[in-house]
Image: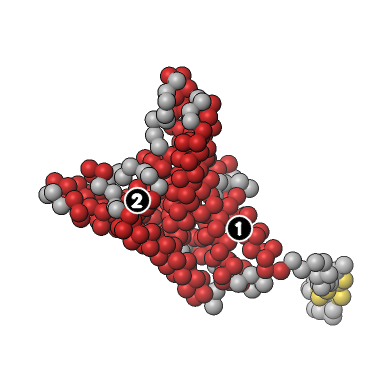
Amino acid sequence: MAVEHPVAAPAGDQTRIHNIGYRNYDGPRLGRSYATRSLYSQSLRGAYGLGRSVKSKVLPMLLFVVMCVPAAIMVAVAVATKAKDLPVDYTRYAIIMQAVISLYIASQAPQSVSRDLRFKTVPLYFSRPIETADYVRAKYAALASALFILTAAPLLVLYIGALLAKLDFADQTKGFAQGLVSVTLLSLLFAGIGLVIASVTPRRGFGIAAVIAVMTISYGAVSTLQAIAETQNSTDAIPWIGLFSPVTLIDGVQSAFLGATSAAPGGSGPTNGEGVVYVLVVLGLIAASYGLLMRRYKKVGL
């Protein structure tokens, strides 16, 4: 309890010394793993605005609904018409909705890291048991998990609807599993790229603009070059051009190994040999993103 000690002072001066009675913490110390899990949980909740203001919930929840509504409509049509297959493959859905996914990562990657940089709270994290690697892993895992929820939820809607429509169980389960593999790679790749870009600036608006620019410009440029290559009958070049955009990278991996139809012009997806290069590039970008984040936050935490 605070104790006041009056001291001699000139008449009219109310100066006092206050002993505020700081006490040592005697409770359990849960350590780095608990702090890392807490940061992961808080960051994942924040990616959907949970625990924050209503305004912060509007955009992520709206994008989640936008992702799921087309899947629900497809299911309703399949059930009503007694179709023998779904209108779209599980592996194609995320590619079709890539604009919504890019907008989500552009809005939530800066939210995850830019505020910590802007308000200089990162050194406060590192003043506790948590270390640079813990911070980076928690933020990366949280955003990748949020993206996985965003992209896997409509696939689950499609799968449940397919079973309700009494479509072939084995085929639908195989397609659903292939779709989950695809969106897992997509979530890891997009989360890494988004966090690296957002960590460069403490200004959230700049981070949003930069992420949108990288995602949309790269996809637009690659699609244009692939279309030009097709008109010039240079179909062999189309798969290699696809290495330069995150969206076409995922499309190439799933068309080479997951039985998906390529979105490239003329359906000129990579062969299995070219697909190996795609996988190596995707894994390399994920590892490079993690490494760049580590270097960035080691400097910030000094």
Q: Quadrant of residue 194?
A: bottom left
Q: Which image quarter is the N terminus in?
A: bottom right
Question: Which is nearer the eye, 88 or 188?
Answer: 88
Relative vertical location of residue 120 with respect to residue 146 in this rendering, above or below: below
Q: Determine if residue 120 is in view.
A: yes
Q: Determine if residue 151 is in view.
A: no
**x then y, percent, for residue 71:** 46, 32
- Name the residue located 57 percent from the left edge and 46 percent from the top edge: 49
The colour scheme is secondary structure
Q: Amino acid at mark 2?
A: Ala
Residue 155 in the figure: left or right of residue 33:
left
**x then y, percent, for residue 277:** 33, 61
Q: Which residue is mark 2?
A: 256
- Local SS, label 2: helix
Q: Which residue is mark 1?
A: 40
**x then y, percent, for residue 182:** 44, 49
Residue 135 in the figure: left or right of residue 3:
left
**x then y, percent, for residue 253:** 37, 52
